[in-house]
Image: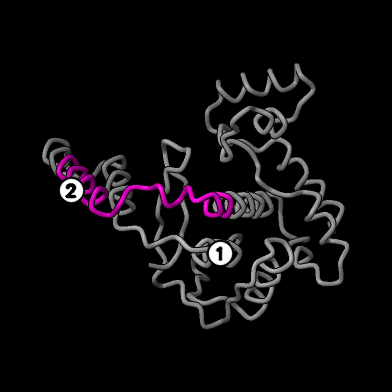
């Protein structure tokens, strides 16, 4: 336990995380090529002429390592978390960094306008209704389509604060049993996330225990991704 374990697990994630983890054949191909060139997955993808950011970890390992040596170290809050919880945390940090880079590059402004999404949503709904008429509504995949249909609703204008709302919710829910759901962060959770935002992400955005999760919804942003990258934030 402690700092050494935390950094060791973070280093493994940062070197070898890829969005292809669920696509075994593609992952094996990329992993093989990377090893042949004595590269990590991160090195392999990041050194391409036009790297696709969501393919590999966007974590700044050296910066986190330096912060863990400081007196105001928010990462010590996570030192005793289990392996699964740490993996979820690292993916959360990756996603936050990823969306901040998209935001700063203006890529999130290139998404479909609301009227275009509204038209697509209506067509999607009609297809679901046809499928229900044929197969009934008790199939898992129809429920999945309905959930994705909800995500096609009007996305609020993306802001840095909404990107950090996803971070806050993640820190508050990782490793928390569903029957212990809270709609507000605890004072400690708000303190830790505020320190992460300030010390690691370098932003001046703060949350308090008054922040409610009741209005949060999942939205899928198809920046560089066919399937969409999920971000949960307020409307």
Instruction: Classify residue 135 as left or right of residue 193.
Output: left
Give yes or no for residue 109 being in the magenta stretch: yes
Q: Main secondary structure of the magenta part?
A: helix
Q: Dot 1 corresponds to which residue?
A: 164
Left/right placement of residue 18 relative to residue 223 reads: right
**Quick one: SS at disc 2?**
helix
Q: Give the residue displayed 62% in from the left and 52% down from the top.
A: 97
In the displayed image of the protein, which residue is found farthest to the bottom? 210
Q: Position of residue 83 (x, y in %)?
A: 71, 50
Q: CA distance from mark 2 to mark 1?
A: 30 Å
Judge whether residue 65 is colored magenta.
no
Pointer 2 and pointer 1: residues touching (CB < 8 Å)? no
In depth, the one of 105 and 88 nearer the eye is: 105
Percent coordinates x, y for residue 130 in the rendering:
13, 39
- Residue, x 58% and y 49% (percent of image)? 98
Element type where label 1 sits in the image: helix
Would you say 136 lies left or right of 37 here? left
Mark 1 or mark 2, which is nearer the start of the sequence? 2
Q: Nearer the viewer, residue 23 or 110?
A: 110
Picture residue at 69% right of the left edge, 27% below the top: 44
**Which residue is at the front of the view, 8 or 64?**
64
Labels in figure, total? 2
How dense is the environment of label 1, judged by Cα within 10 Å: few (below 14), some, or many (20 and up)?
many
For label 2, the crowd category at 10 Å Cα-Cα, with few meaning under 14, some 14 to 19 and many 20 or more, is few
The x, y position of residue 155, in whole percent, is 35, 58
Q: Quadrant of residue 55?
A: top right
Looking at the picture, tell me which residue is in the foreground, 130 or 55.
Answer: 55
Q: Which mark is residue 89?
A: none
Residue position for label 2: 122
The stretch in magenta equals 100-128
* Residue under the image location 23 percent in, 48 percent down: 121
Q: Is residue 34 left or right of residue 144?
A: right
């Amino acid at each position: 336990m402690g700092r050494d374990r935390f950094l060791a697990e973070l280093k493994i994630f940062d070197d070898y995380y890829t969005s292809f983890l669920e696509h075994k054949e593609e992952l094996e191909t990329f992993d093989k090529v990377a090893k042949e060139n004595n590269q990590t997955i991160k090195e392999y993808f990041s050194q391409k002429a036009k790297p696709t950011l969501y393919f590999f970890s966007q974590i700044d390992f050296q910066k986190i390592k330096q912060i863990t040596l400081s007196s105001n170290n928010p990462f010590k809050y996570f030192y005793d978390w289990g392996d699964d919880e740490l993996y979820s945390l690292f993916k959360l940090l990756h996603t936050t960094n990823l969306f901040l880079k998209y935001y700063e590059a203006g890529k999130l402004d290139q998404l479909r306008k609301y009227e275009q999404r509204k038209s697509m949503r209506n067509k999607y709904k009609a297809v679901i209704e046809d499928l229900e008429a044929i197969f009934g509504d008790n199939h898992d995949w129809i429920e999945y389509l309905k959930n994705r249909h909800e995500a096609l609703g009007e996305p609020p204008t993306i802001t840095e604060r909404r990107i950090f709302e996803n971070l806050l919710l993640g820190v508050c829910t990782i490793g928390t049993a569903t029957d212990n759901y809270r709609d507000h962060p605890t004072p400690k959770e708000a303190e830790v996330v505020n320190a992460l935002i300030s010390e690691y992400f370098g932003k001046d955005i703060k949350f308090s225990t008054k922040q409610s999760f009741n209005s949060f919804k999942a939205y899928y942003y198809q920046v560089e991704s066919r399937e969409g990258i999920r971000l949960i934030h307020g409307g």
